Amino acid sequence: MKFVMAKIYPDTIEIYYKDKLIATHERSYLSHHWTIDINHFIHTLKKKPGALHSSVGRCQLSPELQEIYHKYYINNPKDFIVLLELIREKNLESIIKAIKELEKIKIEMVNTENIKNVAFKSPTMDNPSESKDLSIQRASLEQISILNKMFNLNSVGGYEN
C-alpha cells in the first residue's frame, strides 16, 4: 500500500508521493461534481477502449477535443486514445493545426497516423533550414497534379494544378 499527501488550496489540489508532486487537479466546489483528467486514465482506457464513450473524463474534455472526437473518432476510440497521447507529447494546438491541414487536403485524410505525421514532420522555427528546402513539396505537388489530371479531379487545399 502506498500513501500520498494532498495539499488543498483554494483553486487546486496537489498530490504528493514521497515529497514529489505527482498530480495537480482543479478544485471543484460543486456538490457531487468530479473533475477528471482523462490523461490519468489512458493506460486503463487502452485496455477497455469501449469505455471511453461513456467516461466522465471524455465528457469533461475541452470543446475542441469533444468536436474532434465526435467528428472523427466516435467509432474508433482506440485511435482517439492514441491521439490523446500525441496531444500529451506535443500539444493540443499543434494537433488542431495538423487536423486543419489534413482537412484542406481531404477530410477523409484525418486519422491519427496522418495527424502524427503532419504534427511531427512540420517545419519548426527551431530548425529554419527545414522550411527553406521546398523541392520535396514542389515535386509532391507536381505528382498530385499529374494524378489529378489522370483521374479528372479538381485541385484541393488551395493548391493549383
Image: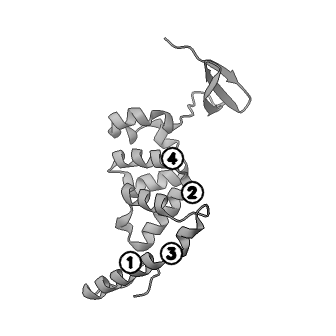
Kindly indicate whether the residue at mark 4 contacts the one at mark 2 (C-beta within 8 angstroms): no
Q: Which numbered disc, 4 or 3, marks the residue that appears first in the sequence?
A: 4
Question: What is the spatial separation of the Cα atoms under label 1 and label 3, in whole angstroms?
Answer: 13 Å
Q: Which numbered disc, 1 or 3, marks the residue that appears first in the sequence?
A: 3
Secondary structure under tag 2 reads helix
Q: Amino acid at mark 2?
A: Glu
Instruction: Report which residue position mark 4 lands on.
Output: 89
Secondary structure under tag 4 reads helix
Instruction: Report which residue position mark 1 lands on.
Output: 140
Residue 93 disc label: 2
Where residue 81 appears, as percent x and y from the top left, is 40, 44
**Does residue 125 sit above or below 28 in this rendering?**
below
Where residue 15 appears, as percent x and y from the top left, is 62, 24
Question: What is the spatial separation of the Cα atoms under label 3 and label 2, in whole angstroms?
Answer: 25 Å
Question: What is the spatial separation of the Cα atoms under label 1 and label 4, in whole angstroms?
Answer: 28 Å
Whether residue 111 is visible: no
Instruction: Report which residue position mark 3 lands on.
Output: 133
Q: Amino acid at mark 4?
A: Glu
Instruction: Kindly give the residue lying farthest to the top in the view shown.
Output: 1
Q: Amino acid at mark 1?
A: Ser
Secondary structure under tag 3 reads loop
Q: Which numbered disc, 3 or 2, marks the residue that appears first in the sequence?
A: 2
